Image (tube, rainbow, N blue to C red):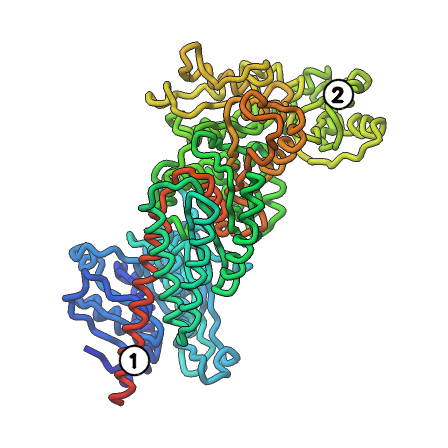
């Protein structure tokens, strides 16, 4: 049933005036859903009589809808591209429907503050509870073009805010978007302020308060017509080439189609069929992945891959393109898979900001398990001012780094069913390793502990009391501490440390080293070496001699209860604490089992001593790790490992396992799961493609379900277009 607003528009100001006269408006509990043109009405409402209001006067339409909802009706305000369905919250609950949001307060006034205060009062919410506020001023300049309508603008603003709540997405003032974090157990609350710059309305300001509903929008598809992903398997070069050109022929037939919608549907169907065929194949020896953003670019990827295959097979090497296509003729398999966890300082502004659109269920689980906002230090990482992120305290960076690694571990293991054989970490990455791989019972407990424990706030960072004690300084003495990355051998630094007792060789990492200590002394040592150092401008005494005094405190800090199943964990955990002693084995007692004290001691040994990351990677390769997947923010470890493996090639680190003629670099591979400056999804798909080519078991379910939703959307669009065409014909 469609309702005609008639002359109700002139009554909206009167209705608003009557609301203002009330001491306190009755709280609203109105369930809201946004239904886009291509979407279908939820099954729960299929037999429900819905009253339809065509959008023409936004405030009047909304008031009319709310009056009808108060009478128990289900109402839909319809616009050309979408509709807003409103109903009593009780009706939604009875129908087992999950609303995108709830309207909790709607008020009008002569000023913005008055309208906002009235709406919050009606919603029984304090201003402090509002974690998203948007203001839209609708004036004559915005409606100077006939196709732009002020009522449509207001309607779209309300619908977008409801969608954002359902997507758990927030938009900052700079228009960048990221996950909508809240305090644990707190619902999201938003306020929309509308200002109508119009002389025909006495009430120029409207305020709408929305609260979080139980419904969430479905996950976005990782694959689409503009993000193509194909897998081809075979037992030989000839079979792979045959698969490449068979795919090229199918693409040629799709290119001949005249309608874009048919091209899109055909590409999606082809990807779906390709993934299904790959999934049911009998695990042939070789697999390659093709990625592109269009049919034309995919054709180029196919041609380049075909041209490269012969040489790749000859060298038993690998081939990859900037678009993400990848093939290796020497697949390493799951038995050589190692997760590598980065240390402090890799986190960056707005990291991982795209992922929640594609993995909403994962974020929901993480929110239930612990304080996701605190885990990622969201107030600093997603602050509108990048400098806030860059100036994070050591403890905050450590928490965010572990949080990023934890999230990405769960993504790769839970969503794609990828299981590592080995795990290791760079510096504090060892803590991330134990937290992320289901060893500690309650890793979230370390968040508050890290922010408050003197160990991280003043002993090895901040005031540097451990350094003061080692140097014999008083509390009033000023310490100018810094660390520098320098390209030189550790031997050349060691030979000069006696001359500079307040300088320490903190880290050895491939062709570079990190020195730390008194800034002036570090600069003098660099000058004596004839080297330029890159200042890290970070205050931490980890991996220096003064940190040794804190060994027992570090053990006490990290001695956490472990889950019973972790005692005999299937993953081999490799620690720098062991490699520093020349031991090539995983962490464990004589029976190879784990316990809290052993883990904490391993972390303390790593943190309180100079870190030889080169030796750690060499030991890992001797133990069998070959395929290193970086599980954390950015890809700094991948860069370091590539350099270490390249320089170590001539040293024949694993000549018991490889022939002298074998190139170690080609027999190992690094894969970043995230990269600063690149799309989160593009980097993730490249990683998935490389793992598949290395014949690591990877679940394709996430990709397939996304394609299924995309195809359903395309089908609905076809139905909608056909219905519109029919209506135009009847008109």
Instruction: Identify residue for label 2.
Output: 491
In what element is the residue under mark 2? helix
- Direction from residue 518 to residue 26 in the image, left or right: left
| Residue 352 appears in the picture as rendered | no
Picture quadrant of residue 640: top right
Mark 2 Cα shell of 10 Å, populated few (<14), some (14-19), many (≥20): few
- Image quarter of the N terminus: bottom left
Q: Picture coordinates of residue 674 (x, y %)?
A: 52, 44
- Which numbered disc flags the more N-terminal residue, 1 or 2? 2
In what element is the residue under mark 1? helix
Instruction: Identify residue for label 1.
Output: 724
**Label of residue 354 in the image:** none
For image coordinates 69% across by 36% down, the residue present is 537
For image coordinates 28% across by 78% down, the residue present is 722
Is 369 drawn above or below residue 96 in the view shown? above
Mark 1 Cα shell of 10 Å, populated few (<14), some (14-19), many (≥20): few
Q: What is the residue that sits farthest to the left in this orientation?
A: 47
Is 281 drawn above or below residue 722 in the view shown? above
Q: Picture coordinates of residue 449 (x, y %)?
A: 48, 27
Is 67 drawn above or below residue 590 in the view shown? below
For image coordinates 62% across by 36% down, the residue present is 642
């Amino acid at each position: 049933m469609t309702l005609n607003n008639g002359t109700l528009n002139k009554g909206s100001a009167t209705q608003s005036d009557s609301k203002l006269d009330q001491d306190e408006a009755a709280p609203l509990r109105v369930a809201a859903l946004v239904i886009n043109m291509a979407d279908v009405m939820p099954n729960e409402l299929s037999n429900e009589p819905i009253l339809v209001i065509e959008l023409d006067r936004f405030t009047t339409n909304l008031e009319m809808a709310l009056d009808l909802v108060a009478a128990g009706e289900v109402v839909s305000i319809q616009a050309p591209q979408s509709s807003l369905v409103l109903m009593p919250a009780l009706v939604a609950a009875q129908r087992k429907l999950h609303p995108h949001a709830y309207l909790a307060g709607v008020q009008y006034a002569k000023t913005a503050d008055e309208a906002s205060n009235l709406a919050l009062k009606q919603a029984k919410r304090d201003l402090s509870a509002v974690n998203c506020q948007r203001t839209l001023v609708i004036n004559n300049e915005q409606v100077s073009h006939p196709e732009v309508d002020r009522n449509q603008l207001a309607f779209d603003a309300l619908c977008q805010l409801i969608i954002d709540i359902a997507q758990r997405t927030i938009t900052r003032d700079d228009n960048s978007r990221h996950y909508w974090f809240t305090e644990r157990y707190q619902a999201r609350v938003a306020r929309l302020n509308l200002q109508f710059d119009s002389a025909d309305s006495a009430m120029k300001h409207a305020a709408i308060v929305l609260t979080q509903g139980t419904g969430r929008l479905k996950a976005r598809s990782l694959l689409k017509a503009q993000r193509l992903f194909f897998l081809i398997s075979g037992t030989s070069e000839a079979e792979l080439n045959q698969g490449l050109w068979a795919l090229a022929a199918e693409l040629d037939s799709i290119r001949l189609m005249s309608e874009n919608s048919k091209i899109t549907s055909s590409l999606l169907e082809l990807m779906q069929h390709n993934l299904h065929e790959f999934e049911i194949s009998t695990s042939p020896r070789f697999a390659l992945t093709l990625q592109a953003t269009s049919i034309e670019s995919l054709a180029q990827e196919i041609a380049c891959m075909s041209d490269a295959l012969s040489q790749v097979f000859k060298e038993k090497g690998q081939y990859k393109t900037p678009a993400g296509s990848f093939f290796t003729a020497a697949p390493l398999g799951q038995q050589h898979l190692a997760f590598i966890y980065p240390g402090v300082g890799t986190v960056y502004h707005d990291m991982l900001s795209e992922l929640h659109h594609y993995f909403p269920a994962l974020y929901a689980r993480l929110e239930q398990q612990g304080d996701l906002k605190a885990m990622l230090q969201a107030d600093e990482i997603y602050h509108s001012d990048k400098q806030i992120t860059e100036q994070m305290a050591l403890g905050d960076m450590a928490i965010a780094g572990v949080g990023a690694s934890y999230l990405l571990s769960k993504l790769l293991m839970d969503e794609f069913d990828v299981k590592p054989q080995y795990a290791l970490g760079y510096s504090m990455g060892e803590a991330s390793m134990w937290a992320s791989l289901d060893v500690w019972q309650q890793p979230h407990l370390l968040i508050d502990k890290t922010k408050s424990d003197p160990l991280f706030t003043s002993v090895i960072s901040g005031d540097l009391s451990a350094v003061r004690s080692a140097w014999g300084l008083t509390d009033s003495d000023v310490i100018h501490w810094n660390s520098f990355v320098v390209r030189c051998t550790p031997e050349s630094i060691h030979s000069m440390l006696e001359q500079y007792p307040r300088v320490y060789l903190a880290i050895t990492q491939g062709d570079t080293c990190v020195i730390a200590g008194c800034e002036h002394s570090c600069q003098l040592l660099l000058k004596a070496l004839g080297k330029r150092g890159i200042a890290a401008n970070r205050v931490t005494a980890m991996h220096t001699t003064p940190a040794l005094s804190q060994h027992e405190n570090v053990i006490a800090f990290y001695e956490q209860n472990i889950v019973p199943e972790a005692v005999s964990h299937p993953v081999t955990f490799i620690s720098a604490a062991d490699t520093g002693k020349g031991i090539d084995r995983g962490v464990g007692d004589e029976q190879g089992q784990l316990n809290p004290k052993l883990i904490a001691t391993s972390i303390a040994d790593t943190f309180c001593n100079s870190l030889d990351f080169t030796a750690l990677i060499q030991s890992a390769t001797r133990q069998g790790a070959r395929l290193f997947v970086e599980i954390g923010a950015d890809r700094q470890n991948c860069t370091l490992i590539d350099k270490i493996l390249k320089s170590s090639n001539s040293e024949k680190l694993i000549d018991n396992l490889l022939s002298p003629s074998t190139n170690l670099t080609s027999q190992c591979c690094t894969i970043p799961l995230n990269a600063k400056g690149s799309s989160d999804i593009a980097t993730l798909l490249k990683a998935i493609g490389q793992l598949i080519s290395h014949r690591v078991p990877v679940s394709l379910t996430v990709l397939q379900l996304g394609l299924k939703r995309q195809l359903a959307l395309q089908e609905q669009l076809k139905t909608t277009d056909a219905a519109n065409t029919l209506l135009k014909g009847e008109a």
